[in-house]
Amino acid sequence: MNKFACVVLTISDKGSTGQRKDTSGPILKELLEAKGFAVPFLEIIPDEQPLIEKKLREFSEGGEIALILTTGGTGPAPRDVTPEATLAVIEKEMPGIAEHLRAESFRKTPHGILSRGRAGIRKKTLIINLPGSPKAVRECLEFLEPVLYHALELVRGEFGEH
């Protein structure tokens, strides 16, 4: 059984007001739970940078949450501010993760390079921005799977020297 707890944050103006049904967040929760993660929180919030920053800080503060996955708000649209919010709260950037997700996404669709998602560490929590489409979150989680558990062990200091 996986020992890590994860939060899924959907960033969507329309989703947060009920104008659009969130499908990406529930898909991520289901896939993570199938891999043994505990997912105690699945939340939908609007594309508001201060609120996104607040939530990222809250969930990474206590040490219980090992992973925060955001979905949405990573594109070039004017209201897409998830990467900026993430950069404002992380202490260490993990550029290889975001680069890998873009590269692999590009193999599936040229639109993959439009994602501005970031990844980084705050305290002992790994934060990764994923695109907002259900197809993209499935694919990105698949791309992350080979390294995710080891990355979380390292971030949390549970692996030791190597």
Image (spheres, rainbow, N blue to C red):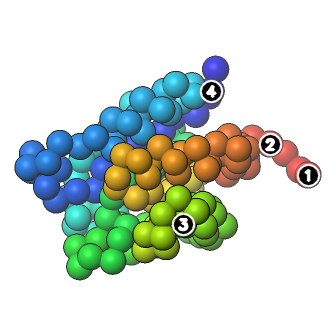
Q: Which mark is first along the chain, 4 or 3?
A: 4
Which x, y percent locates residue 156?
67, 46
Q: Which of the 4 image quarters holds residue 35?
A: top right
Q: Give the residue pinned by disc 1.
A: 162
Q: Which mark is first along the chain, 2 or 3?
A: 3
Badge number at residue 2:
4
Q: Is residue 99 left or right of residue 146?
A: left
Residue at mark 4 to residue at mark 1: CA–CA distance: 22 Å
Q: Which mark is first along the chain, 1 or 3?
A: 3
Q: Which of the 4 image quarters holds residue 145?
A: top right
Question: Would you say the residues marked 3 and 2 are in contact, meaning their CB atoms lie under 8 Å apart?
Answer: no
Which x, y percent locates residue 117?
46, 67
Which x, y percent locates residue 38?
49, 28
Residue at mark 2 to residue at mark 1: CA–CA distance: 8 Å
Along the viewing direction, whichever of 80 and 121 lies nearer the viewer: 80
Density class for disc 2 (Cα within 10 Å; few <14, some 14-19, many ≥20) is: few
Which x, y percent locates residue 144?
61, 49
Question: Would you say the residues marked 2 and 1 are in contact, meaning their CB atoms lie under 8 Å apart?
Answer: yes
Badge number at residue 51:
none
Q: Give the residue pinned by disc 3.
A: 106
Q: Which mark is first along the chain, 2 or 4?
A: 4
Residue at mark 3 to residue at mark 1: CA–CA distance: 33 Å
State whether residue 9 is above or below residue 109.
above
Q: Give the residue pinned by disc 2.
A: 159
Badge 3 marks a residue whose secondary structure is: helix
State whether residue 155 is above or below residue 92.
above
* Viewer can see residue 99: yes
Q: Nearer the viewer, mark 3 or mark 1?
A: 3
Q: Nearer the viewer, mark 4 or mark 1?
A: 4
Could you tell me the amino acid type at mark 3?
Phe
Could you tell me the amino acid type at mark 2?
Phe
Density class for disc 3 (Cα within 10 Å; few <14, some 14-19, many ≥20) is: some
